[in-house]
Amino acid sequence: MKYKLFTFIFLSFFFSVTNASNDEKCFEDSKSLITDLYKNYPVDGNKIIESADRKTISRFFSNQLTNMLVKDYACRSNLNGVCNMNFNILSNAQDDIGKFSILQATDNIVTVKFNTPTHGEFIDFLIENKGKCKLIKNIKYDNNTNLIKILQQ
């Protein structure tokens, strides 16, 4: 009986620790999702989200976008060049375009503005709920296009 009780307590503790670590990887609000994305993948181009592993990409993006980003990066690696994207998806630019600010963050959309010398670039992150977690389902750019459309070419 003591053995069963010990096993039950041990397993309960183990699964609660596992669940807690999974919850840490979930973003429960859209602003923290985008803030963490830019913190880990700054727009200076030294580290891009597309080059991350599938598990990391799926922390930020919906299943559809994760699959599309992984596929495009694999294509890029196979061709030693460019497939559908020739820009940083977080800035809509090939070069570092400077500082940015989050203008709005609601449950469904986060608007980011880059303060470039010549003009302001706006990017809208469309957010979806997956349970209690927030994920990016698409990115809309100023030039009337979006990430899904670009990746489908």
Image (cartoon, rainbow, N blue to C red):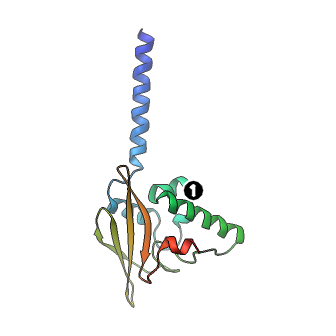
Quarter of the figure with residue 109: bottom left
Instruction: Decide if residue 79 is in sight here.
Output: yes
- The residue that label 1 is drawn on is 53
Query: Residue 42's spot in the image, x, y percent?
Result: 45, 69
Query: Residue 112's spot in the image, x, y percent?
Result: 35, 74
Quarter of the figure with residue 136: bottom left
Q: Residues within 10 Å of mark 1 (few under 14, many from 20)?
A: few
Q: Residue at x 71, y 67 (%)?
A: 78
Quadrant containing the N terminus is: top left
User: Residue reaching furthest bottom?
Assistant: 118
Q: Nearer the viewer, residue 109 or 9?
A: 109
Q: Residue at x 34, y 72 (%)?
A: 111
Query: Residue 52's spot in the image, x, y percent?
Result: 55, 60
Quadrant containing the C terminus is: bottom right
Q: Residue at x 53, y 80 (%)?
A: 94
Q: Nearer the viewer, residue 140 or 2?
A: 140
Q: Is residue 131 left or right of residue 147?
A: left
